[in-house]
């Protein structure tokens, strides 16, 4: 091989490696943006659901329990508020909708009684738990060391959500009128909200 060609070959190899790294970095950035944007939207929605439930049932015997779960959701939301600012992530354009829809969902199920409010909690937290598990897999596949902080946050919040799910079951969620139909409708709505928030 000509000595004149070697620098060109080396230069081409370096350019390809740089391009490959740039593509991976862009994919990682897109993944993080998507995760933080949708989780921020989800935690806002959860915060408003518990706010709606508490507005209706706050002075009943189940009020303190709803308040306890609501406080955890407030912490989740505050964490994603911080991550949004730190990572400069654009929020979903649908935040105003999720703000209103979450409160309406929480209040309307609470008006059907404590059992329906708990059924709402079970349905929402079931979907969110699965969603967080999917994100954990994505982050592990991309780079577990690089995403250590975010993985710890998502794992902790997933465990909180699954605890809320179990709490709902322990407090008579399955005694709600039309439990199966009610929870399925809520799950479909939650999955739709997640999908849209990832895109918009």
Image (spheres, rainbow, N blue to C red):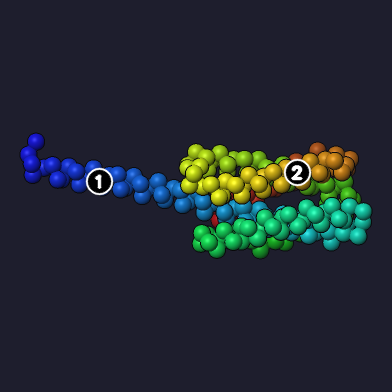
Locate the N terminus by quadrant: top left
Q: Is residue 104 visible to the viewer in this orientation of the structure?
A: no
> Which residue is pictured at 62% across the width and 40% down the height?
133
Which image quarter: residue 163?
A: top right
Res 114 label: none
> Which residue is pictured at 87% across the width and 56% down the height?
63
Give neighbour class at mark 1: few <14, some 14-19, many 20+ (Cα, 10 Å).
few
Using residue 149 as the reference point, say whether residue 99 is left or right of it: right
Locate the C terminus by quadrant: bottom right
Q: Is residue 141 visible to the viewer in this orientation of the structure?
A: yes
Under tag 2, what secondary structure?
helix
Which residue corresponds to mark 2? 163
Q: Spot the residue most to the top.
A: 1
Under tag 1, what secondary structure?
helix
Among the two numbered marks 2 and 1 on one chain, the one whose residue lies closer to the N terminus: 1
> Residue 97 location, x and y as percent?
67, 60
In this view, 170 is above or below 34:
above
Give 168 or 120, whichever is nearer the viewer: 168
Query: Spatial distance from mark 2 to mark 1, Cα to Cα?
Result: 50 Å
Which image quarter: residue 55?
A: bottom right
Give 14 or 92, whichever is nearer the viewer: 14
> Which residue is pictured at 56% across the width and 60% down the height?
84
> Residue 178 location, x and y as percent?
85, 41
Which residue corresponds to mark 1? 14
> Residue 59 location, x and y as percent?
91, 60
> Which residue is pictured at 53% across the width and 61% down the height?
86
Using residue 99 as the reference point, say whether residue 58 is left or right of it: right
In this view, 38 is above or below 1:
below
């Amino acid at each position: 091989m000509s000595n004149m060609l070697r620098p060109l070959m080396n230069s081409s190899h370096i350019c390809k490696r740089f391009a490959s790294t740039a593509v991976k970095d862009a994919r990682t950035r897109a993944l993080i943006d998507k995760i933080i944007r949708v989780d921020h939207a989800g935690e806002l929605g959860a915060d408003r659901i518990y706010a709606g439930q508490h507005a209706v049932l706050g002075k009943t015997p189940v009020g303190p329990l709803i308040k306890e779960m609501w406080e955890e959701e407030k912490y989740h939301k505050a964490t994603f508020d911080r991550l949004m600012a730190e990572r400069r992530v654009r929020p979903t354009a649908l935040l105003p909708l999720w703000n209103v829809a979450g409160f309406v969902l929480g209040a309307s199920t609470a008006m059907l009684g404590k059992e329906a409010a708990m059924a709402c909690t079970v349905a929402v937290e079931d979907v969110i738990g699965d969603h967080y598990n999917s994100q954990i897999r994505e982050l592990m596949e991309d780079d577990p060391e690089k995403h250590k902080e975010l993985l710890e946050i998502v794992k902790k919040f997933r465990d909180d959500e699954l605890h809320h799910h179990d709490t709902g079951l322990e407090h008579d969620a399955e005694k709600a009128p039309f439990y199966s139909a009610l929870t399925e409708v809520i799950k479909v709505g939650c999955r739709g909200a997640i999908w849209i928030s990832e895109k918009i």
